[in-house]
């Protein structure tokens, strides 16, 4: 079995890729796909670039060109739920494209993907369980020895939580509390907002490939987001991504 590991930015993916053994690199469509073994499993890793089209393209290539049989997407997101704090982890039970709206045509409801008849793409139950276990082990056991205390304290990260729920995807970097409130009113159980997950979920659905999306909360999707985001990605999330994904790989059945 080969497991695909995707992130939207190199900072989210570079530690994972650097740890891959017996590696080979294929450049295709302006992306580098790194194959090899990690935690004893066959993997293919890449950063997709930002946005739904880029993520869908990378996921499709992983499945059709490199034979990925499961896909893990990991990276950062902005909080949509008031219960979330910076440094918490959201695992998507389901993914929705919040900027999809063909409802001007009476046959479709808002958020529905035309011709698929789906609004929410369900993540794989087993991968959700494995992700939750690996995230708990990393956050509660490994985190404090993996990231400098000064970096954790900068964001008030002391006892990060793991939350399961809905992740919303759209081609927007949202830094507006009013937009978040509106989306929360329209999407039950919404936890966080990002720019790739539901596109990967749609590709996986169409190819019948199990997937899971794991997001570390980098900001509150408000006016401070643009200031919090870059440093958080470079100093925190690369460690989260490697720590959780490598923990997952040890638990996934070959």
Image (tube, helix red, strand yellow):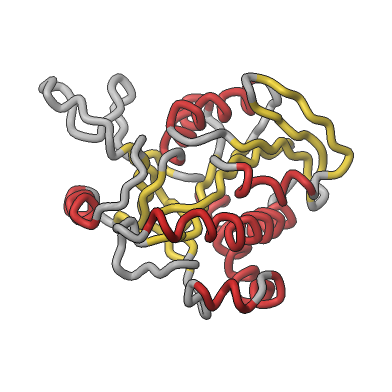
Looking at the image, residue 26 lies above or below residue 142? above
Image point (55%, 44%), residue name? 73
Looking at the image, residue 222 lies above or below residue 8? below
Q: Where in the figure is residue 9, as x and y percent of width and height?
A: 57, 42
Left or right, 136 with respect to 54, comes to: right
Image point (60%, 56%), residue name? 234
Left or right, 153 with respect to 66, comes to: left
Image point (50%, 28%), residue name? 54
Q: Where in the figure is residue 217, as x and y percent of width and height?
A: 45, 60
Left or right, 98 with respect to 216, comes to: left
Give the residue at the far front of this rendering.
227
Q: Where in the figure is residue 232, as x and y percent of width and height?
A: 53, 60
Q: Quadrant of residue 103?
A: top left
Quadrant position of the C terminus in the picture: top right
Q: Quadrant of residue 29?
A: top right
Q: Quadrant of residue 191?
A: bottom left
Image point (56%, 24%), residue name? 60
Quadrant position of the N terminus in the picture: top right
The mark tally for this picture is: 0
Q: Nearer the viewer, residue 177 or 169?
A: 177
């Amino acid at each position: 079995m080969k497991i695909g590991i995707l992130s939207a930015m190199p900072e989210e993916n570079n530690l994972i890729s650097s740890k891959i053994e017996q590696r080979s690199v294929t450049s295709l469509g302006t992306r580098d796909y790194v194959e090899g073994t990690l935690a004893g499993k066959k993997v293919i890793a890449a950063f997709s670039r930002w946005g739904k089209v880029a993520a869908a393209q990378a996921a499709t290539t992983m499945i059709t060109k490199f034979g990925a049989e499961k896909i893990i997407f990991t990276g950062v997101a902005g909080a949509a739920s008031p219960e979330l704090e910076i440094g918490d982890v959201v695992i998507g039970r389901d993914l929705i494209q919040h900027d999809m709206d063909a409802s001007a045509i009476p046959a479709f409801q808002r958020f529905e993907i035309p011709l698929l008849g789906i609004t929410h793409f369900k993540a794989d139950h087993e991968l959700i369980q494995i992700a939750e276990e690996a995230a708990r082990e990393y956050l509660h056991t490994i985190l404090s020895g993996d990231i400098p205390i000064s970096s954790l304290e900068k964001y008030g990260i002391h006892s990060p939580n793991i939350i399961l729920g809905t992740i919303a995807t759209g081609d927007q970097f949202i830094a507006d509390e009013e937009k978040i409130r509106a989306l929360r009113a329209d999407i039950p159980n919404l936890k966080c907002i990002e720019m790739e997950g539901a596109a990967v979920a749609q590709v996986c659905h169409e190819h019948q490939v199990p997937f899971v999306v794991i997001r570390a909360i980098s900001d509150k999707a408000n006016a401070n987001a643009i200031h919090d985001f870059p440093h958080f990605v470079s100093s925190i999330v690369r460690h989260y991504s490697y720590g959780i994904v490598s923990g997952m790989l040890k638990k996934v059945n070959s």
